[in-house]
Amino acid sequence: MILIVNAENRSLFGAELGAMHRQRKAVFVDEYHWRVPVIGDWEVDEYDGDGTTYLIAKADASSGEVLASARLLPTVRPHLMSDLFVAACGGRAPTGPRIWEVSRFCVSPAIAKRRMRVELLWEVACGVMETALLYGIEKVTFVAGSALLPLALDCGWKCARLGPTLPDGDDEITAVVASITPSGLRAVRRRLGVETPVTRFALPAVKIAA
């Protein structure tokens, strides 16, 4: 199950968002040694704002455990690819009202089995496509390291490299664009082995005056 969390319903998911930021610090800062901003035990940067949408994977609605997460950013405002990874796009990052950037894909460090980690990646990809279709988004962009790239290219959606693969410390990165279509969503669902939506979107209760 993938929770869609944005400005409309963020107040409902404080615990899940806190767990997500702590997992991001544990993975990206403590394990990968990224030089990114940290506030206490949270990894949080300038792109984590009111206009940010998060996808949070849980086993079910009653579970308190966050299994994985990702961040969706509109490209009509500053985002990672336009600010930091233009060279990986061949000099120009795709932007527009129907293009989102996906970043900060993170799996809980408590999950060690590779198969489950891959399945979570594909489930989040499915969630990205469902959310994008809901909001009229036609393309998503992302930057993948060497381990993530083949998995992201093979999850079922139609995608292409945007530019050259570039060195990045001890790794290398490749910028990718994926098309968002109903047929692509069906292909990702087949790869995941599901037939129904994986996303859930909850809104706060509204009191109606009598």
Image (cartoon, rainbow, N blue to C red):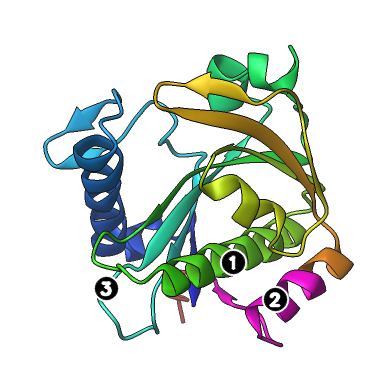
- Residue 188: image x %, image y %? 72, 70
Residue located at (63% from left, 32% from top): 174
Write down the quadrant of residue 19 in the picture: bottom left
Mark 1, secondary structure of its residue: helix
Write down the quadrant of residue 161 in the picture: top right
Residue 141, above or below 47: below
Q: Quote the CA–CA distance across marks 1 and 2.
A: 8 Å
Residue located at (39% from left, 74% from top): 58
> Residues at badges 1 and 2 in contact (C-beta under 8 Å)?
yes
- Residue 155: image x %, image y %? 69, 63
Q: Nearer the viewer, mark 3 or mark 1?
A: 1
Residue located at (39% from left, 81% from top): 59
Residue wearing tag 2: 191
- Residue 33: image x %, image y %? 25, 31
* Label 1 CA crowd tier, 10 Å (few <14, some 14–19, many 20+): many
Residue wearing tag 1: 122
What is the magenta range? 186-201
Residue located at (66% from left, 86% from top): 194
Q: Nearer the viewer, residue 175 or 147?
A: 147
Q: Which mark is residue 9?
A: none
Mark 2, secondary structure of its residue: helix
Amino acid at circle 1: Trp
Amino acid at circle 2: Arg
Amino acid at circle 3: Glu
Residue wearing tag 3: 65
Q: Nearer the viewer, mark 2 or mark 3?
A: 2
